[in-house]
Every structure is written in structure tokens, then in C-alpha cells.
Image: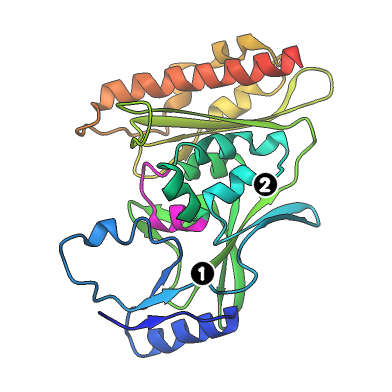
């Protein structure tokens, strides 16, 4: 077993990372551990671990100024238990899909991002929320758009001496609503074949003022669909909203063949899920 550190403060945690980076020794920040342990089945746990679960101030969801702050060690259960506006309905729907109850109680939202799996359920939702990732080191904090934080499959822009401390989500009008749909090989406890998240804001007159749509598990990293987002602006917020989707709108995606589905199947599923979700969100607004 490698070293195990469990600091009480963020300053202690960042100092430990800075010391490890200076010594060129890997020190792995860890919170829920729901990805860490399964990846090491059958071999000794020889990593140096920095357990963040005791660090004060890293857990919880609150509005600060003009944006929401989701602490890095906030669990998926916390997301479900927190009273949040409809803007977060997509993220809450994804929270119900992250494993079973035991996983939801332990797994953290920042861990889902740092693991950087192409099939991470939280990523499309947070992209659709226009989220940023806050990283803190001994020298201070910086924020990156989520699209810049995840650099590829299992790769992020986090520096060795940094900790993800929060996810930052801009505020939105009270009428803004999010949604999430996912397809897997079975109903529960499943890795996605494809998933889609969307956030819609209306202009006060029943039309789309702003749209954000993201698709996961159909590229190395989840992707926004900017051409579709632009095409949705000005459209009536009703159940016909899904009809706007055209094949060219999904051009940013690059699905692959794997054991869960072929690239062609993934592309077809992604288009279907996008249409379905937009129709659901538009129809819900029209009946509200």
C-alpha cells in the first residue's frame, strides 16, 4: 500500500499535492472511490492517495452571486436531495442513472468528470448547463469550461498540483428547464450506448431564446451540437421542437463500434434521443 493522506483543509491538501509534484511523485486525489477501486481489482493498491472526504467546504450546492456552485465532493445523492430549480432537471435525471443507491451515496460529481469516461453520465448534463470546472492549487484557483477540462478519454487538464474544488453553473431564468435521456443494453445499472442532455430557455413569448444540447458516449468526449442550438432559437416551445433536428446537426459526433453497439447504431440512437428529448422539453413547456 502506498501513502494515504486525509487532510482536513484545502490548504493542507494543495500543499501535499505541491510537495508530491515537486518530488515527481504521483499523488492521486480521491473522494468517492467508486471508479478507483474497480480499476484495481486483482492487484495491490500501491498508489499514493489523497483522500478529500474530510476537507471542509467541498460539499454542497449553493447559489453564489450569479452562478451556482456545486462542491467537488457533492455526491449524486446530494444532487437528488437538494431543492434545485428545473434548470437542473437533466442533472437530477442523470443522478438517478449513476449506478445503484450505494454508488449514488458515495460517488461524487467531480469524480465523474475527473474519470473522463466517454460514457460519464454527468458530462452531457453539465455541458448543457454551460458549466465550468474550478481547480485550486497552492498558488490559487482557476476556472476552465468543462469542454476544455476534459481533454480526451481518461484525460483532463488538471495539473498534478491541483484539486477540482467545484463545478460552476451560470444562473438562468426561472423558466429554464433541463432534461436527460440515456439508452443502454438494459434498464438499470448500465453503461450508456448513447445519451443526450439539453437545456432550454424561453423568451417569455413561448419561443426558444437559448438552447444547449450535448450528446455523450458517441465521441471520445461528450459534444455540444452548436448548429442545432442555433437552429432552435426562435422556434415555438412545443412538442414539435424535435422536428428541427436534421442529420447535419449531429456532425460533431464520432461514434465508434464496440461491444455495446455499432457506430451506425449509435448515430441513429443519438438522433432519436435528441429529437425525443427536445419534444419532451418543448411539450412540457407548452402544457405548463
- Which quadrant would residue 57 be assigned to in this image? bottom right
Q: CA distance from mark 2 to mark 1?
A: 19 Å
Task: Tell me what residue is drawn at x 43 percent, y 31 percent.
Answer: 195
Q: Is residue 130 visible?
A: no
Sequence-first disc among 2 and 1: 1
| Foreground pick, 132 / 288 | 288
Magenta residues, as a range? 110-120
Q: Check the image and report above or below for 71 versus 3.
A: above
Residue bearing the label numbered 2: 82
As drawn, the label of residue 53 is 1
Task: Tell me what residue is drawn at x 46 percent, y 85 percent.
Answer: 16
Residue 111 inside the magenta-drawn segment: yes
As drawn, is 199 to the left or to the right of 28?
right
Q: Position of residue 162 (x, y in %)?
A: 49, 74
Q: Which secondary structure lies at badge 1?
A: loop
Q: Residues within 10 Å of mark 1 (few under 14, many from 20)?
A: some
As drawn, is 15 to the left or to the right of 155?
right
Q: Check the image and report above or below for 274 versus 12.
A: above
Task: Tell me what residue is drawn at x 45 percent, y 58 percent.
Answer: 111
Q: Quadrant of the C terminus?
A: top right
Amino acid at each position: 500500500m502506498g501513502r494515504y493522506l486525509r487532510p482536513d483543509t484545502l490548504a493542507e491538501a494543495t500543499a501535499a499535492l505541491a510537495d508530491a509534484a515537486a518530488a515527481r511523485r504521483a499523488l492521486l486525489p480521491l473522494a468517492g472511490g467508486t471508479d478507483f477501486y474497480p480499476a484495481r481489482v486483482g492487484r495491490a493498491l500501491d498508489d499514493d492517495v489523497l483522500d478529500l472526504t474530510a476537507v471542509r467546504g467541498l460539499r454542497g450546492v449553493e447559489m453564489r452571486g450569479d452562478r451556482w456552485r456545486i462542491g467537488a465532493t457533492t455526491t449524486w445523492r446530494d444532487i437528488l436531495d437538494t431543492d434545485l430549480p428545473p434548470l437542473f432537471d437533466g442533472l437530477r435525471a442523470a443522478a438517478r442513472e449513476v449506478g445503484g443507491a450505494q454508488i449514488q451515496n458515495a460517488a461524487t460529481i467531480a469524480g465523474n468528470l475527473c474519470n473522463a469516461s466517454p460514457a460519464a453520465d454527468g458530462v452531457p448534463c453539465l455541458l448543457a448547463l454551460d458549466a465550468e470546472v474550478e481547480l485550486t492549487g497552492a498558488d490559487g484557483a482557476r476556472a476552465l469550461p468543462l469542454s476544455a477540462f476534459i481533454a480526451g478519454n481518461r484525460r483532463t487538464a488538471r495539473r498534478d498540483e491541483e484539486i477540482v474544488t467545484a463545478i460552476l453553473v451560470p444562473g438562468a431564468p426561472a423558466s429554464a428547464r433541463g432534461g436527460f435521456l440515456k439508452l443502454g443494453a438494459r434498464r438499470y445499472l448500465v453503461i450508456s450506448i448513447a445519451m443526450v442532455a439539453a437545456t432550454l430557455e424561453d423568451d417569455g413569448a413561448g419561443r426558444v431564446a437559448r438552447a444547449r444540447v450535448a450528446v455523450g458516449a458517441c465521441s471520445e468526449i461528450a459534444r455540444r451540437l452548436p448548429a442545432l442550438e442555433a437552429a432552435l432559437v426562435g422556434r415555438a416551445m412545443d412538442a414539435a421542437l424535435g422536428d428541427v433536428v436534421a442529420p447535419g446537426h449531429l456532425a460533431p459526433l464520432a461514434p465508434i463500434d464496440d461491444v455495446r453497439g455499432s457506430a451506425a447504431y449509435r448515430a441513429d440512437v443519438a438522433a432519436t434521443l435528441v429529437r425525443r428529448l427536445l419534444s419532451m422539453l418543448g411539450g412540457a413547456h407548452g402544457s405548463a
